[in-house]
Image (spheres, rainbow, N blue to C red):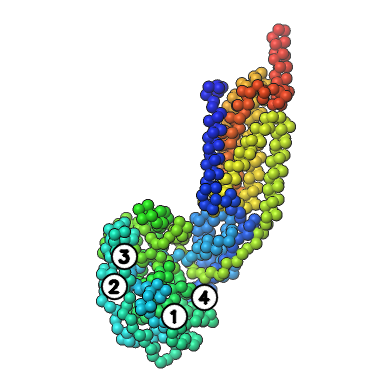
Amino acid sequence: MASSSTVHPARYLALFLAMLIGAYLLVFLTGDKKPDPKLGIDLQGGTRVTLTARTPDGSPPSRESLDQAKQIIGARVDGLGVSGSEVIIDGQNLVITVPGDDTSEARSLGQTARLYIRPVVHVIPSAAAAPPEQAGPQGVPPGGVPGVPPGAVPGLPPGSGAAGRGARAAAGSGAAGGPAGPDTPAPQPRPFPQQPAPTPPPGPSPAPGPTPPPGTAPPADQDVPLATRIQDEKRLRQSTEQAIQILALQFQATRCGQEDVLAGNDDPNLPLVTCSQDGNEVYLLDKSIISGEQIANASSGLNQQAGEYVVDVEFKSDAAKVWADFTAANVGTQTAFVLDSQVVSAPVIQEAIPGGRTQITGQFTQTTARELANVLKYGSLPLSFESSEAETVSATLGLSSLRAGLIAGVVGLVAVLLYSLLYYRVLGVLIALSLTASGAMVFAILVLLGRYISYTLDLAGIAGLIIGIGMTADSFVVFFERIKDEIREGRSFRSAVPRGWARARKTIVSGNAVTLLAAAVLYFLAVGQVKGFAFTLGLTTILDIVVVFLVTWPLVYMASKSTLWAKPSLNGLGAVQQIARERRAAASAAGRG
């Protein structure tokens, strides 16, 4: 029996109150500071993006490739914590639907995520970032470039070829694999000497359609087959001839803000001319030394020293050796991390990097760093995709269904409270306080989960919450019935409470453990909205144990010490006490006989 000297109900209540206040401080002082849980597609609608598969040869994608892409995107959904999203195959397309109106989540899930690490041969500013005197010639038509004679344009300037890479990058003493430290001069882009655009020789252009007039960019001809457009881009931007590379650099500098037809379709065994992700620089890159398939793991985090978000990459054993040897031989040069044919980061190699771990830096936010780490971690898609405009999806059930679910929950809660008041009298008030405390904590947790891991509450999740109310009420019934058993044995209300609690808590923990195990199994084996049901059921089960131990038990214990609450007319235990008296009288009579 627990004595009054070892029970401190005020401490339990204070602990729960501190947890509740802490949760609501996070709700109102962090994030958007709005106490609104994130709702699922069925309750608030969402955003749909259709991804159209693109193959280099223009052939239809295979069903196997689409299935594999769907599985990878599904894994990315789980990695981002975008609960309630849907990924389906529609003919030759993938359709991604995410809750809310944020299109960036759906688009990031469809990234091809073909990562290559390429040495930087040369870099120039784009037309948008360069001053007018450094801007390259405008409107070099792609169709005319493959026909340029090798001697039409002078060769590359000294130090701009593969052998001259070490002269361009400034040596630094910062973190290995990261950008140069604050005292290290960043390598400055050095443009090629300006050359007049050479006139292509007579003859038909490889790209169909009229040749644009000088000084204008060629229009994107939607009638040209995609495979032809990709091949034209490869001939222009992946040529091994220096003259064409110069033209490709200058031409690419004029269109860094445009959609890249080559995205995800570049040949890693050839050089590449491409833009940086921010569109400010144009790079001539050597062939790939490491591909994304050789990544073992990727994660994001905040670099405390630099004060910026980074992506940490761990290579597999073969790639780790290649990376160690390459960085040891190319200290002081730039190396580009190229994602879907765009340069994400081009850090300076400051020292040899053994061990197979390195770091991607860039103008990352917490969200973009997490998204990049996610797509690299779960692998490259077997196809490249072109995303459509985002479409708004109306709620399939809508706010009326949410309102109906909430009304059902309130009706169930009121029914439980009325039953408790009728059966347990004033003790039912303690049940009401416990349920209120549980509901307040559940609401705060749902808001925080939606804010930090993008958990979305759908109608199935609301059903799990309603069932959780019943589970919590069951715990109260078990406790109070144990108290009644003790009183039937002749104990007072004051002494029956700690004895009843000692017996009831084992039953409460065992019953909740079974429910929690069932919810966990259902969560890991189920798909779709059933996961939401299992999640909220498990959440309310855990909170049931917390509330019973930190709220209900201390409140009942404090009531047992009160002479007012000990009155049978208030606690509803008069009939049980009468049974106890009859049993004592019968036992006394039997003893005298």
Q: For the residue carrying disc 4, how many other residues have a C-alpha within 10 Å: few (<14), some (14-19), or many (20+)?
A: few
How far is mark 3 from mark 2, CA to CA? 20 Å
Q: Secondary structure at mark 2?
A: helix
State the CA–CA distance, disc 2 to disc 1.
24 Å
Furthest-front residue in this view: 132
- Which residue carries the number 4 mark? 59
- Measuring 43% from the left and 87% from the top, which residue is drawn there? 214
Tell us which disc is closer to us: 1 or 3.
3
Is there any visible trace of residue 86 in the rendered image? no
> Which residue does the image show at 60% across and 26% down from the upper left?
558
Alpha carbon of mark 1 to alpha carbon of mark 3: how far? 34 Å
Of circles 3 and 4, which is in front?
3
Q: Earlier in the sequence, mark 2 or mark 1?
A: 2
Q: Position of residue 368 (x, y in %)?
A: 46, 60
Say which amino acid is labelled 4: Ser
Residue type pointed to by label 2: Ala
According to the image, label 1 marks what residue? 232
- Numbered disc 4: secondary structure: loop
Q: Which type of secondary structure does the marked residue at label 1 adopt?
A: helix
| Amino acid type at mark 1 | Asp
Crowd class of label 3 (few under 14; some 14 to 19; many from 20; radius 10 Å): some
Residue 447's disc is none
The x, y position of residue 530, in whole percent, is 61, 51
- The label nearer to you, 3 versus 2, is 3
Q: Give the amino acid at mark 3.
A: Ala
Instruction: Report the residue marked by disc 2.
Output: 162
Q: Earlier in the sequence, mark 1 or mark 4?
A: 4
View extreme (bottom): residue: 202
Depth order, front residue of 448/484:
448
**Whole-number angstrom distance, CA of label 3 to CA of label 4:** 44 Å
Residue hosting label 3? 186
